[in-house]
């Protein structure tokens, strides 16, 4: 005796619904927001004092190809940003005049948040031990505050050596930064060895990266995002 047509129709509908669900689950992605904070490295500042293509721009481009980007917020960046000035922005809930968006609001709405702080701040002259300690303590406070407002993907860039910031000092600071990132479940992006690639820089006298260096950083971050299926 054959299966009644009514049951066949119901089974077909159910099968179609299940297939549609899995296609939606694995292939559809809600558009999301990327927020980038930081100093000259975050902005893609070049050795010629102009803003070039940053690692954040490459991440934005990667997701724009699949039309996942709802908004890309970079207006909180400042090429002379320090941990002190950024911490003030966080604690006072600094608001952009152009869009009336507060920094806490931007953090809360972001699915991908990147932060690069330290290369400008720690390449000043005549820094003392207390300056490095203050930097590390501020990073701890900053990541703690960001985590309060955002439970999603946060990326923090490590330091790398320069003519004013030697490798021994960088390693010591990076070891502490790595522990802080682990404490707040923040992705630590290790670029300590980036100076080994001379073609990532305009010349040996300047620590600002060129587009190749920024693309290298973006690829490290995108690899992690792919692993997270984001």
Image: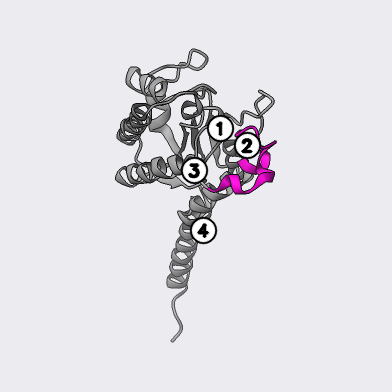
Q: Earlier in the sequence, mark 3 or mark 1?
A: 1
- Mark 2 element type: loop
Q: Work out whether residue 111 or residue 148 is closer to the camera in this orientation and state it.
A: 148
Q: Is residue 148 above or below residue 9?
A: above
Q: Nearer the viewer, mark 4 or mark 2?
A: 2
Q: Earlier in the sequence, mark 4 or mark 3?
A: 4
Specify the color scheme.
Answer: one colour
Write down the residue under mark 3.
Answer: 167
Q: Looking at the image, is mark 1 or mark 4 earlier in the sequence? A: 4
- The residues bearing labels 4 and 2 have C-alpha atoms spaced at a distance of 41 Å
Q: Quadrant of residue 149?
A: top left
Find residue 191 and report its horizontal and vertical position in percent.
52, 46
Q: Nearer the viewer, mark 3 or mark 1?
A: 3
Question: Between marks 3 and 1, how big is the CA–CA gap?
Answer: 18 Å
User: Residue drawn 66% across and 37% down?
Assistant: 204
Which residue has dot 1 on it?
41
Q: According to the image, label 2 marks what residue?
A: 209
Q: Is residue 200 magenta?
A: yes
């Amino acid at each position: 005796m054959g299966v009644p047509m009514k049951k066949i129709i119901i089974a077909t509908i159910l099968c179609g619904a299940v297939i549609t669900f899995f296609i939606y689950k694995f292939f559809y992605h809600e558009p999301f927001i990327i927020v980038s904070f930081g100093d000259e490295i975050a902005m893609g500042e070049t050795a010629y004092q102009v803003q070039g293509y940053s690692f954040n721009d490459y991440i934005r481009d990667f997701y724009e190809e699949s039309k996942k980007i709802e908004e890309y917020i970079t207006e909180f960046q400042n090429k002379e940003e320090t941990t002190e000035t950024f911490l003030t922005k966080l604690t006072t809930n600094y608001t952009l005049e152009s869009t009336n968006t507060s920094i806490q609001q931007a953090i809360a709405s972001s699915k991908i948040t990147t932060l690069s702080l330290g290369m400008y701040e720690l390449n000043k002259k005549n820094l003392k031990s207390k300056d490095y300690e203050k930097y590390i303590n501020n990073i701890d406070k900053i990541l703690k505050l960001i985590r309060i407002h955002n439970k999603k993907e946060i990326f923090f860039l490590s330091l790398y050596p320069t003519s004013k910031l030697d490798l021994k000092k960088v390693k010591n600071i990076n070891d502490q930064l790595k522990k802080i990132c682990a404490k707040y479940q923040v992705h630590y992006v290790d670029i300590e060895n980036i100076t080994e690639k001379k073609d990532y820089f305009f010349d040996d006298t300047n620590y600002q990266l060129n587009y190749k260096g920024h693309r290298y950083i973006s690829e490290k971050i995108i690899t992690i995002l792919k692993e997270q299926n984001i």
